[in-house]
Image (spheres, helix red, strand yellow):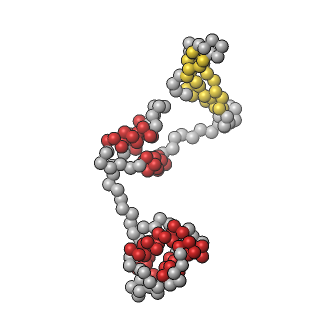
Amino acid sequence: MPTATISMRKLKEILRLKYDCKLSHRKIANSLSISPSIVSKYACKSAELGITCWPLDTKWDDHSLQQAFFKTKPRLKGFSIPDWSLVQQELRPKTMTLLLLWQEYKERHEEGFYSYTHFCRQYKAWLKCQKPSMRQNHKAGEKLFVDYCGPTMNIVDASTGEYRTAQVFVAVMGALRLPIVKSSKIG
């Protein structure tokens, strides 16, 4: 099934130019201001339906063309859908990513699984349906929000070659968009 939808007028014009005028897909595309790949997809679909000449057979009225070209249903894959609320809980640790969760999902469902991009799209679509967290309004510079970044970092003293570990904190002032980064030495 063609992915882009065109008007019935353009569909008929594609068929006329292809079978009556015998134009190439590129010339048809240029004359109708559409891409050659769209012309190609509709030409292939017409060949599958047995449409190979112009004028069209009487059985191909507007309604039957509409049904044949635009009303086909996509084939649904029967792959297992993850429990998105569990995925959201597993994403809480700072070191966990959607890629790691997808790889686990793929290993559990070797018989059939969704691609990584589809997995991410489905998760984001589910996330949009969830209730948003509480919104807070802040006057600029009134409050400072600090968060711990995660694992420690190694810092090397260039003169001595000594390693020290440091915790990294990020602070943002309410209503500002500029982070303030501060590290604290541990050892």
In depth, the one of 47 and 32 nearer the eye is 47
In depth, the one of 76 and 51 nearer the eye is 51
Q: Residue at x 44, y 50 (%)?
A: 118
Q: Where does the image place residue 178, in percent across and percent down from the top left?
A: 67, 34
Q: Is residue 46 above or below residue 2?
A: below
Q: Where does the image place residue 140, in percent across and percent down from the top left?
A: 69, 35
Res 10 visible: no
Q: Quadrant of the N terminus?
A: bottom left
Q: Where does the image place residue 165, in percent across and percent down from the top left?
A: 55, 17
Res 34 visible: yes
Q: Residue at x 32, y 54 (%)?
A: 78
Q: Where does the image place residue 37, in percent across and percent down from the top left?
A: 51, 67
Q: Quadrant of the C terminus?
A: top right
- Quadrant of the image occupied by residue 181: top right
Q: Residue at x 47, y 47 (%)?
A: 124
- Quadrant of the image occupied by residue 75: bottom left
Give the number of callouts. 0
In depth, the one of 9 and 52 nearer the eye is 52
Q: Residue furthest left?
A: 111
Q: Is residue 131 above or below residue 50?
A: above
Q: Residue at x 51, y 24 (%)?
A: 151
Q: Is residue 93 above or below residue 111?
A: above
